[in-house]
Amino acid sequence: MEIVRPQSHRNLFSSNDAVSVPTIPLYRSAPPLEVRLEDFESFAIDRLRVLKGISDGLSRGKKPDEMEKLVEESWKVHMRHQHASEVLNKDIISHFVLRLVYCRTEDLRKWFLSMECALFRYRFRYRFRFLTTEAQRAIMDEFDLTCKAVNNVEFESIKEKLGQVARSMGQPSPTVDTIFYKVPFEEVPELVAGRKVFISQGYAYVAMNQVVSLVATLFRSQLSKTLILTNRKWTASIRDQEKHRLTPIVEALSSSYLGPDFSQPREYAEISLKDIDQVAKTSFPLCMRHLFDKLKEDHHLKHGGRMQLGLFLKGVGLNLDDALAFWRAEFSKKVGLEKFEKEYSYNIRHNYGKEGKRTDYTPYSCQKVISSTPGAGDQHGCPYRQFSEENLRAALSRMGVNSRAMEDVMDKVRNRHYQLACTLTFEALHGVACDAGINHPNQYFSDSQKILQPKKDSSA
């Protein structure tokens, strides 16, 4: 792909070619087309929203049918294009951009490979089932599989065995019209492990309605290899050649936060100084509750903690005057009023865009909080990641999380699903499902207030 700045670019496929292209491409090679710099980033972000939705759904243990519905709906929302003819281009471009983004480390490759394979599997399964037998054959031919369909003579010789396997799964026996592919059994490990195929002399006989497993294995193998090759190209040439244009975008995308920035208070998210102690107990996420409690206890926080909590409070609606009064009241108990005004008040005004470059700083997202690396004496960061199990259990207990919910939270922590652990904490404390998941501390606060404020109003 060539990245350009012009305001138009040509379609990847002509109208005649598009007919023969499978609805779900295999992304074997980068397409020969020009891509606007704006599209390079925006297309990748849209696809990233889909992949992160899949990651969240899988972490939550959603069933295959639920995941299939989630993928289809997410794809329609995020991967649409104002010009229908450009939808396929957006699909292909976004994949190759993210391949470049996620080729750079082993952890990034592992995540991208897993999510792209899940996306491919669910999209393929959904589309494939609505095709005619002839159309299904045509799609399979597009994949250039080394295996061939079983002929009638061979089918008759193993018909009874195939019927036994089908009946064991509660399916009708195959007929002469049923298409089977004969493949080396190691190419369909999922079907073999589930005893869903007949195996003879090292070959598995895969029915047409099972080919998603075969094709997904092929897709995974190819993508795994190309990610390694892309990484070599990235380190050898692309990174340096594009250091002033693409490299900053590529390096930022893998850790980008995709939700609202909460730079301005949202509905139900405005607090005053007199409210802060109460809402801290009811609506602060654990990362902010911990900082708030430590500030009240020690009357001091190091720079990282002041930034994390201070920008959060700004995002929930604490105005500059109240923020200065809040920090002054706590810090002056330890460092004195004069030292506070001389050494700390400037940074608070700076965060509100009133000093220095007048930048209006935004609150930290979950991703930024989780990725921080607190040092000795620091209190900032994500408790689900940083705390020992004993300390985390104690903190959750103080918040009011019951023992059953706590075990679910700890299970997610052990599997390093920190945002999902926070989401389960929110659900346990508020008694409602949070299907979108928690992606930002200020989102936690805003969603909490939406639930609690109506209860206050009705009781009043």
Image (spheres, rainbow, N blue to C red):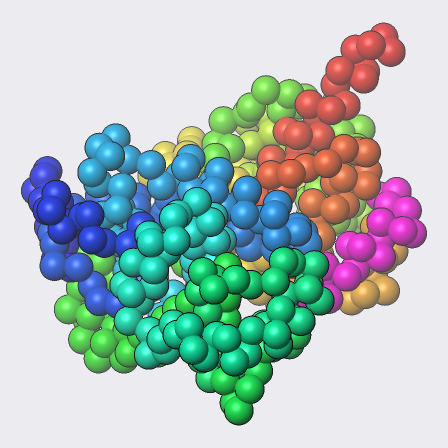
In the rendered picture of this protein, how many numbered marks are placed on residues?
A: 0
Residue at 81% across, 65% down = 389
In the image, residue 400 sits, relative to residue 377, either above or below, namely: above
- Say if the magenta span includes residue 54: no
Split into 4 quadrants, where in the image is the C terminus?
A: top right
Q: Determine if residue 284 is in view.
A: no
Q: Nearer the viewer, residue 120 or 80?
A: 120
Residue 129 locus on image (x, y percent): 47, 49
In the image, residue 351 sits, relative to residue 206, either above or below, namely: above
Q: Determine if residue 21 is in view.
A: yes
Residue 219 locus on image (x, y percent): 39, 69
Residue 134 locus on image (x, y percent): 33, 54
Residue at 76% across, 39% down = 427
Relative side of 446 to 105, left or right: right
Relative side of 259 to 13, left or right: right
Magenta portion: prevailing SS class = helix
Residue range in magenta is 399-415
Residue at 64% across, 29% down = 446
